[in-house]
Image (cartoon, helix red, strand yellow):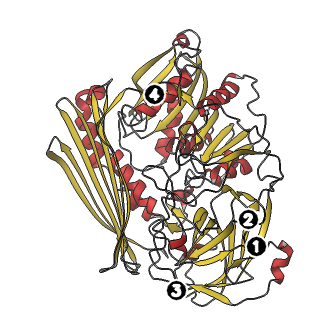
Amino acid sequence: MRYVTNLPYATKEEEHVTIPMSDGVRLSAHIWRPTSSDQEPVPAVLEYIPYRKRDLTAVRDSIHHPYLAGHGYACVRVDLRGTGDSEGVLRDEYLEREQQDAEEVLAWLAEQPWCDGGTGMMGISWGAFAALQVAARQPPGLKAIAIASFTDDRHADDMHYMGGALLSDNLAEAGTMFAYGTCPPDPAVVGDRWREMWHERLEHTEPWVLQWLRHQRRDDYWRHASVCEDYRSVRCPVLASSGWADGYSNAVTRLLGHLDVPRKGLIGPWSHKFPHLGEPGPAIGYLQELVRWWDHWLKGVDNGVMDGPMLRTWMQDSVPPSTAYEERPGRWVGEPEWPSPHIRQAVHPLTRHTIGPPREAADEENAPDGDALTVQSPLSVGQFAGKWASYNAPPDLPYDQREEDGGSLVFDTEPLTEQLEILGSPTVELDLSVSEPVAMVAARLSDVSPDGAATRVSYGILNLTRREGTESPEPLEPGRRYRATIPLNGVAQAFPPGHRVRLSLSTSYWPLAWPPPKPALLSVHEHSSTLTLPVRPVEEPDEVPASPFGEPEGTPPLATTQVTPPEERWEVKRDLVGYHAELDIVKDRGTVRFEDIGLEAGRRAHERYTAVADDFTSVSGESTWTMRFQRDDWDVRVVTHTRLTCDDTDFFVDATLDAYEADRRVFSRTWNEQVPRDLL
């Protein structure tokens, strides 16, 4: 990244500004703005997240907020209530109160003498969720948003449930917020009230995994703040981006296809990162794109930002399987609109472990009824699946799928005679039966090289009790034939000549997804089952220059010192005596000293997923977090632990929350809860 110090506007910053809410709670904001805004007001851009502006996101914030401020904007980074130095308690994600707060913050910004009344919202992940959800509420003065790595559907396309199956990231993310939501504010900012504010958080926090498990169907809890319920509610322009390695690879194209506002889409090869910090690379000059976006929509500059294709995306070339990549080879392509007129749906029948050549859709009704192929997968299928949402640290992408394929039903094409490129969401339609009333199917699409190495390209999961929808699941009748459609995650991928395209079907995918109560035998009837690929013909024009973006740039990052080293670990372990299998993940940032405020902060996350043999009720997941903050004689620590287990009929959550001042424990609470399984 190129660090820039010579910007069009000189800037000033206010590190801790309190913004009053209507219920008396005060939120803490960090503001960067042009010095000249005292005389010449500018638009304001809000980023609104719960991840602690003063320390834990301070380095990242220092790269992009001063950069945008130096281009003529008041950039405002606000801690959600109950996080960082804001008052109150953070009780769950995306609550009505959270969105009301955001609207009140925007109204406050518009009234400031240094703001011209126009506002925008930006962010990644939670910040992007917040911007999209607030945009759907149409607050006055919100003129545009720029969002990265988000979803418009909280139930079907978030870290909680996929195809009605419970994701392990549901536990992992709940563990993250269990820790972040119980950290104290900084006494250097809030003064002597820090301890009172901290204990309010500690005393009123419940592990969020309990709430998320209580809503296993798509209900009003998930419909709230899911913009897909009414796309027409979004009335401002939207710049939407994500990465193919991210869990949020689908919402960009959905927004492009459903919104009726000026919109642009951008999808790179990245994991859960801003595009200018994108890993795997290439990262791009995203902040320059943001300046052009805000200049047009907040300042009225006629700069052509809406020219060119609606969607720009990275067409990924074939790569060997790896759990991490520094760069993904490929090229930028563009589509004039979405759905794209360039894409054709190629329907391939599945026949005797083979993906047949495409046939006309009209021929599907006349497909012969073939014999059934069967599979009952072991719990080991999924140990090389990687994370639902990759952060690329520790290396967390899927590894070589050949071992996974050993417990799966596999269909291959013949070796390709010419390059095949797909762009969009593949789908699998199965004519199937199962042996149990609750069963799941995981479908994986892989690029198989001539030497046999299999690189997963996309995947999808379906809880078959939700095959007709996630609102009203129904148990399956063992032996009865059903039709089920499994959408796979969107992707742009090139398969070179000599390679094969592989579809793999399994009845478990642990630990990425929680398995059903019992192993199920899946029978798939050939000929009447299909794989549909969204083919982008190679001869179609790319519609974009070879290098449509500038080099990543930002302002110099905040000065920090790594006091203790970070640690990253991702280990698959198997005991062939007791048949115990384990995935052990450590993400320890070490201790970092923030030189400007004399604060040392440490974060350590440890996830552990276990199973015994093929006992589907033996699975367990654990998330342990330690957060520590130190300055002079101030030394505080929060330790959270959440464990999720099950039997045939129930989930069991055991959680602890401990808080320390120095080595003295000042708070402790334990939860032992039981939640019924709802055909899950």
- Rate crowding at label 2 as few (under 14), some (14 to 19) or many (20 or more) other CA atoms within 10 Å: many
Height in image: 314 above or below 24?
Answer: below
Q: Nearer the viewer, residue 225 or 557?
A: 557
Residue positioned 80% across, 54% down in the render = 538
Residue bearing mark 3: 436
Real-space CA distance between mark 1 and mark 3, rounded to the nearest whole angstrom: 28 Å
Where does the image place residue 55, in percent across and percent down from the top left? 36, 33
Residue bearing mark 4: 62
Earlier sequence position, callout 4 versus callout 2: 4
Q: Quadrant of residue 529?
A: bottom right
**Of marks 1 and 4, the one in the foreground:** 1
Where does the image place residue 550, in percent across and percent down from the top left? 65, 31
- Rate crowding at label 3 as few (under 14), some (14 to 19) or many (20 or more) other CA atoms within 10 Å: some
Q: Which mark is residue 348?
A: 1
Query: Disc 4 marks which amino acid?
Result: Ser
Real-space CA distance between mark 4 and mark 2, rounded to the nearest whole angstrom: 42 Å
Height in image: 3 above or below 470?
Answer: above
